[in-house]
C-alpha cells in the first residue's frame, strides 16, 4: 500500500497510465489551467493497494490570508478520486489521504464528483455528500437516427428553421475563429448578467483548446451569412465528450442556432465512438437552461455530487469564527470561512 504525491514539477503521465478510463479533467494541464483561477497550485495523489489504483488530482489553495501556514484543496471539473472496485481499498485510501492532509495542514477538501462515474457513492461513508444539481448527458451509443428521435419537437423544429436559413456548423481552427467565439462568449455573459467568475481572459480560452493526453478539444461555430453567430467548446475524452462553454449572438438566437449546434456536438461525439456527451445542468434547478439541455434526450438526469470533508476540525472552527461564518456546521457554502470572499 502506497500513496505517491505528485506536484506541479512532476510528470503525472506514468501514474495516469496505471488507471483506466480517466476523463478529461485528470491531466496536469487541465488542473493547472484552473489552478490560477482558484488561487492555487496543482497537485495529485496516486494510491495503490494490491491490484487496485486510485488517481486523484486537485488544487491546493493557500490560506495564508486567513491563517498563515494552512491550505485547503478543491478538485477541478467533473473528477474526484478515480473509480475503485473494492470498498475496503477506498477506506484505506481515505484514511491515508486524511493523514497526509493533516500533515500538510490542509484544513478542508471539496470534491466535485463525476456525474457518470458513480465515484461519489464510494465515498459516501468518508465525507458529506451534497447534491449540487441534476445534469444532462446524451447517450451517443445508439444510431444517430435513434438519438435524434429522442429530441423534443421544439428541437427538431428549430433545427429545421436554422437549416432553412442556411445556418451551417463548422469546426474552428484558426486564431480568428477563436477570437470570434470569445467575442460571442462575452456577449452571452453580458446578456445573462453573469458574475465575474464566468469571465475568462484570452490565454484561458487558448489553454482549453490545447490537446492533452486525455482530451481532444474542439471549437464548433454556427455560421450565418458568413458570420459566426454561435459557438461551443467541446472537450472529448476516451469515453465522454463534454460541452464546456457555449455562446451565441442575441439577434440570431430565434433562428435555432443553438439547437443546430448541440445536434452537431452530439453527431461528433457519435462519430468519435464515445459513450456519452455531458451537457451539464442549469444555473438553477429546472431552469430554462436545464430544460433546453434536457430537450435533447429522454434519459433521466444524472446527479452531480459535491463532497465536503474537514481534515482539521479545530482549525476549521477558528477560520470560521475569524471570517464571520456564524454556524460552520450548517453553512450551505463550503468551506464556510470562504463564504464572504467566494
Image (cartoon, rainbow, N blue to C red):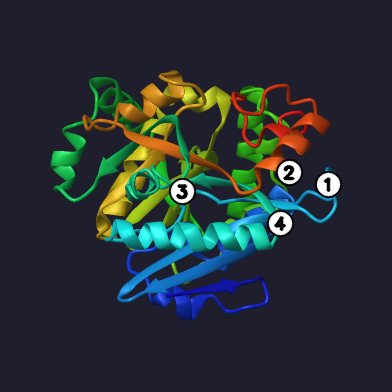
Reading the image, the residue beneath label 2 is 315
Vertical position of residue 222 compared to residue 171: above or below: above
Q: State the separation of the CA atoms marked 3 and 1.
A: 29 Å
Contact (Cβ within 8 Å) of mark 1 with mark 2: yes
Tell me if label 2 and label 4 are in contact, CB under 8 Å: yes
160 displayed left or right of 94: left
Using the image, tell me which numbered label, if any, was put on residue 67.
Answer: 1
Secondary structure of the residue carrying numbered label 4: loop
Q: Earlier in the sequence, mark 4 or mark 3?
A: 3
Whole-number angstrom distance, CA of label 1 to CA of label 2: 9 Å
Q: Which residue is mark 3?
A: 78
Q: Are marks 2 and 3 in contact (CB under 8 Å)?
A: no
Q: Earlier in the sequence, mark 3 or mark 1?
A: 1
- Residue 237: x percent and y percent? 39, 60
Whichever of labels 2 and 3 marks the residue nearer the N terminus, that label is 3
Question: Residue 105 has which mark?
Answer: 4
Q: Are marks 3 and 1 in contact (CB under 8 Å)?
A: no
As drawn, the residue found furthest toward the front would be 314
Q: CA distance from mark 1 to mark 4?
A: 11 Å
Amino acid at each position: 500500500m502506497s500513496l505517491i504525491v505528485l506536484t506541479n514539477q512532476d510528470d503525472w503521465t506514468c501514474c495516469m497510465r496505471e488507471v483506466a478510463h480517466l476523463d478529461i479533467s485528470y491531466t496536469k494541464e487541465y488542473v493547472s489551467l484552473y489552478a490560477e483561477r482558484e488561487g492555487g497550485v496543482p497537485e495529485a495523489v496516486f494510491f495503490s493497494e494490491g491490484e487496485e489504483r486510485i488517481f486523484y488530482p486537485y488544487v491546493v489553495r493557500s490560506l495564508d490570508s486567513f491563517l498563515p501556514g494552512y491550505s485547503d484543496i478543491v478538485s477541478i471539473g467533473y473528477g474526484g478520486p478515480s473509480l475503485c472496485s473494492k470498498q475496503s481499498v477506498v477506506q484505506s485510501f481515505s484514511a491515508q489521504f486524511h493523514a497526509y492532509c493533516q500533515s500538510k495542514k490542509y484544513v478542508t477538501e471539496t470534491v466535485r464528483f463525476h456525474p457518470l462515474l458513480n465515484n461519489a457513492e464510494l465515498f459516501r461513508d468518508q465525507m458529506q455528500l451534497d447534491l449540487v444539481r441534476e445534469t444532462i448527458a446524451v447517450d451517443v451509443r445508439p444510431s444517430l437516427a435513434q438519438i435524434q428521435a429522442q429530441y423534443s419537437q421544439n428541437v427538431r423544429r428549430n433545427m429545421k428553421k436554422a437549416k432553412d436559413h442556411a445556418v451551417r456548423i463548422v469546426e474552428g481552427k484558426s486564431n480568428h475563429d477563436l477570437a470570434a467565439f470569445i467575442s460571442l462568449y462575452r456577449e452571452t455573459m453580458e446578456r445573462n448578467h453573469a458574475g465575474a467568475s464566468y469571465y475568462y481572459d484570452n490565454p484561458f480560452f487558448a489553454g482549453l483548446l490545447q490537446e492533452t493526453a486525455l482530451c481532444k478539444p474542439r471549437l464548433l461555430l454556427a455560421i450565418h451569412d458568413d458570420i459566426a453567430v454561435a459557438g461551443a467548446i467541446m472537450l472529448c475524452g476516451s469515453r465522454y465528450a463534454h460541452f464546456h462553454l457555449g455562446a451565441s449572438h442575441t439577434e440570431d438566437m430565434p433562428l435555432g442556432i443553438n439547437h443546430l449546434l448541440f445536434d452537431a456536438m452530439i453527431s461528433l461525439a457519435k462519430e468519435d465512438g464515445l459513450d456519452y456527451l455531458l451537457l451539464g445542468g442549469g444555473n438553477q434547478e429546472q431552469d430554462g437552461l436545464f430544460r433546453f439541455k434536457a430537450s435533447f434526450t429522454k434519459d433521466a438526469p444524472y446527479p452531480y455530487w459535491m463532497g465536503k470533508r474537514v481534515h482539521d476540525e479545530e482549525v476549521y472552527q477558528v477560520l470560521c469564527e475569524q471570517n464571520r461564518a456564524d454556524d460552520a456546521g450548517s453553512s450551505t457554502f463550503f468551506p464556510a470561512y470562504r463564504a464572504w470572499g467566494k
